[in-house]
Image (cartoon, helix red, strand yellow):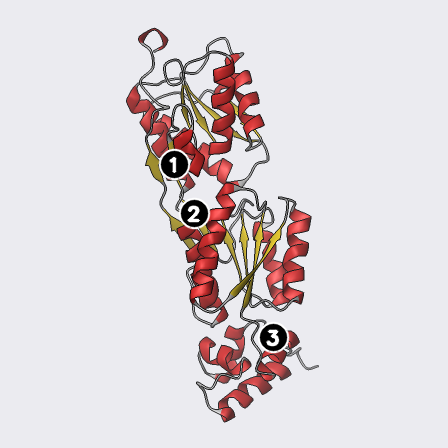
Amino acid sequence: MNSPVHKPTSIKDIARIANVSSSTVSRALHNSHLISRRTAERIQSIAKESGYSASAIARGLVTQRTKTIGVVVTSISDPFVSDVVNGIEEYANDHGYSVFLANSNAEPERETKVVQSFSERRVEGIVVTSSRVGALYRPLLSEMRIPIVLVNNQHPGEFVNSVLIDNVKGSADVTNHLIQLGHRRIAYIGDRFGYQSDMERLTGYREALERADLPFTPELVVHGDGKCEGGMIGVEMLLSLPKSPTAIFCYNDMTALGALRQLNLKKISVPGDISVIGFDDLFIASFTQPPLTTVRQPRRLMGRLAMESLLKLISGEDSATTIKVPAELIVRESTAPPREDLQ
């Protein structure tokens, strides 16, 4: 009995059979003039016989490239997302690509449907910001044959290609800053949805406490929703403790805005009574009262890096699986040493 014939599942498989580079296969499938007609026809024949994605071959055979990219965002109104998209568009425009934008409303099922709809519109690649699907894209990749790059993947687990902030180090820097100021009861208001970034920031917080020989106190960790309302609720929970914290590290700047508002409503001075730190460095962070100490994410750069990685994948070049960018602590006026009577 004959064994079943193994069919290639990627450009790399076709390249191995044809004994050429992945970039040569990509050019052949797009009828590039950079390779000979004979080589292109041989590679296209191998791809057809191997059952490689018919839509991918069709695009090459009819010498059409859409020069379009799909970008999936959680919410167009999210200030974090807008800067990332600006970076994506800048790099895309510089390289002759147009960008289609779609909103997932932070719903995993909708996110998947949007990505599939982009595939049907024959975009050449897709960038997903703050993905709620994450590693679950692996099976989709084998079906769609379209490169996907994630920015700040929020789903636990590794994905093929992604650009993300060094959350662990960023949150450790935050906690170290507060420890160096003299704080010992440092609270963390996280995000109750269990996103990857929240888990990593909590990890950095705990590791910094451990290095400073400070105990991790579970009651000082509460969870909001990543929005202002969650920050307000988180502050209420922390103030209800027998002994309040002297500093609060917030999952993001939106949470910190809510925390500042609730503390102000309670007539609690920041940073006189409680220090507050955010994460993101949104444009509004320098305009709060007091100006917010936070962690800067190079959002525009992350968008450009994601687009650069995507174009490499489209052209058949190798691209780094994970690109991790550094976080930068921005010290403003919302943090200060604790009052002597609170130490």
- Coordinates of residue 65 in the picture (x, y in percent): 56, 75
Looking at the rendered structure, the secondary structure element under dot 2 is: helix
Question: Which numbered tag is attached to residue 56?
Answer: 3
Tell me the distance, in whole angstroms, between the alpha carbons under discs 2 and 3.
Answer: 32 Å
Of tags 3 and 1, the one toward the viewer is: 1
Q: Do the residues labelled 3 and 1 touch (CB within 8 Å)?
A: no
The secondary element bearing badge 1 is classed as strand
Q: What residue type is labelled 1?
A: Val
User: Which residue sits furthest left?
Assistant: 180
Do residues under tags 2 and 1 come within 8 Å of each other at their CB atoms? no
Amino acid at the residue labelled 3: Ala
Residue receiving disc 1:
295
Q: As drawn, is 11 to the left or to the right of 121?
A: left
| Viewer can see residue 231 | yes
Residue at 60 percent of width and 78 percent of height: 59
Instruction: Give the residue drawn at x 46%, y 20%.
Output: 217
As drawn, 333 above or below 62 = above
